[in-house]
Amino acid sequence: MTDMHTILTAQRDAFMADMPVTKAVRLDRLKRAAAMVRDNAARFCDAVSEDFGHRSREQTMMTDIGASLAPIAHAAKHLDRWMRRERRAVQFPLGLLGAKAWVEYQPKGVIGIIAPWNFPVNLLIAPLAGVFAAGNRAMAKTSEYTPATAALFEELVPKYFTQDELAIVSGGADVGKDFSALPFDHLVFTGATAIGRHILHAAADNLTPVTLELGGKSPVILGASADIARATERVTLGKMMNAGQICLAPDYMLVPSADEAKVVDGIKAAASAMYPSLLANADYTSVINDRHHQRLTDWIADARAKGATVEVVNPANEDFASANSRKMPLHIVRDATDDMIVMQEEIFGPVLPIRRYDGIDDAIAQVNRRNRPLALYYFGSDEAERRRVMDRTISGGVTLDDVIFHVSMEDLPFGGSGPSGMGAYHGIDGFRTFSHARAVYKQSKLDVAKLAGLKPPYGAAAAKTIARVMRG
């Protein structure tokens, strides 16, 4: 494979030679990206399922294929408006004298994308929608945990793009380390918070701007006014999608003490209805690899050892211990305490701790003593309580009366806060993340410097200007 530095140099040279990047060129790249995904949807589904050991074709079609095509279509539809110069105000009296100011959104150049394994198509293509809309070129690093998907990208991308437009880089942690140290014009990383710290360190040496899409423990707060049956079904759907391997998965639930038993019953009923069996169920996804399966198993054992009651939702009474499978049923962890690993680390699997609270301020305090999460979920019809939760917590995003859905709204920015990430993309926010907002000021034909007293020798005009400034 061509050296990464060589690819980057070739992309940057081609970018500079082609400036300015027209709307037609941007739309053409978006069109080709959509065609690549659409034309090869079945092959992507097969590759992702091979990488996971099993993943539902319908789920991949929705969460990886459809969720890749939607941001491309949104960008193409709105590109004309996004590209327009943005008029800005000019201070009095310069505007009256003929001066003008505006912002032009220029492409940055070459963008690096580091994609994770949990949605290996979507989390490479979705950032690319904003990257191409903004007029950039891109190098994308695939995850070593999804080698079949990576190999398919390596095969397909050259059929739709020249290497100086889009290049795929595959390999392990050593390749990822070198990739993040390249002097990109912007770098996007989606993955674990611990790795995000290393990415930021590597990018700092080149002063590369970075967008980090991380994770964290996204809480569900079940308000006293919530419809428990509806809420538990929606939480269960979100938790068991991709077997919980989603950065936005509901990580733990905070429920009123009096409602805990009803909540547990609701989750069990919902899980059993959606997945009446698991091992042979084509709708249910496997844990990605043996290491993650063992990690989850160890964390469940740790919770049990520290006093938790763990309820396994296994409606068909299947024998998971002897099965040659990494499928894992939903584990509800009751009496979860802060000394348990499941309440310290992002779970990323079908394990759901439940904690009781007494009064909404107690729930808010439990959220706020942890790192700021990527998402926060609130269920309830009490508007005052909902507003208090929103006002007294900080998270990357919020979905009310459901989970995860805010990420699928193309016109909402997607990003974290603090340990759950920095920066945002999606829609116009992605376009602006991958653009340089270039300030432009056009001076009046009049001698503004003399009129304002800025030109020596200083005299009465300068004194008037200073007096006006001091008045505010």
Image: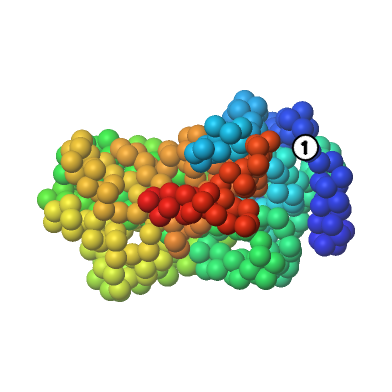
Residue 35 visible to the viewer:
no
Please, is residue 369 above or below residue 49 in the view?
Answer: below
Kind of residue sitting beneath label 1: Val
Total numbered circles: 1
User: Which residue is label 1 attached to?
Assistant: 21
Q: Which residue is drawn at 43% across and 49% down?
A: 468
Please, is residue 94 above or below residue 355 in the view?
Answer: above
The colour scheme used here is rainbow
Q: Is mark 1 on a helix, strand or loop?
A: loop
Foreground residue among 396 and 262:
396
Question: Percent position (x, y) of residue 303?
Answer: 32, 69
Residue 81 visible to the viewer:
yes
Splitting the image into 4 quarters, where does residue 367 fall?
bottom left
Q: Which residue is drawn at 50% across and 64% down?
A: 193
Q: Which residue is drawn at 33% across and 64% down?
A: 370
Foreground residue among 438 and 250:
438
| CA neighbours of label 1 inside 10 A, class few (<14), some (14 to 19), many (20+) | some
Q: Is residue 85 left or right of residue 298?
A: right
- Give the quadrant of the N terminus: bottom right
Question: Percent position (x, y) of residue 167?
Answer: 79, 50
Splitting the image into 4 quarters, where does residue 332 fall?
bottom left
Question: Percent position (x, y) of residue 266?
Answer: 25, 42
Q: Residue at x 18, y 55 (%)?
A: 361
Foreground residue among 60 and 199:
199
Q: Is residue 97 left or right of residue 238?
A: right
Question: Percent position (x, y) of residue 441?
Answer: 64, 42
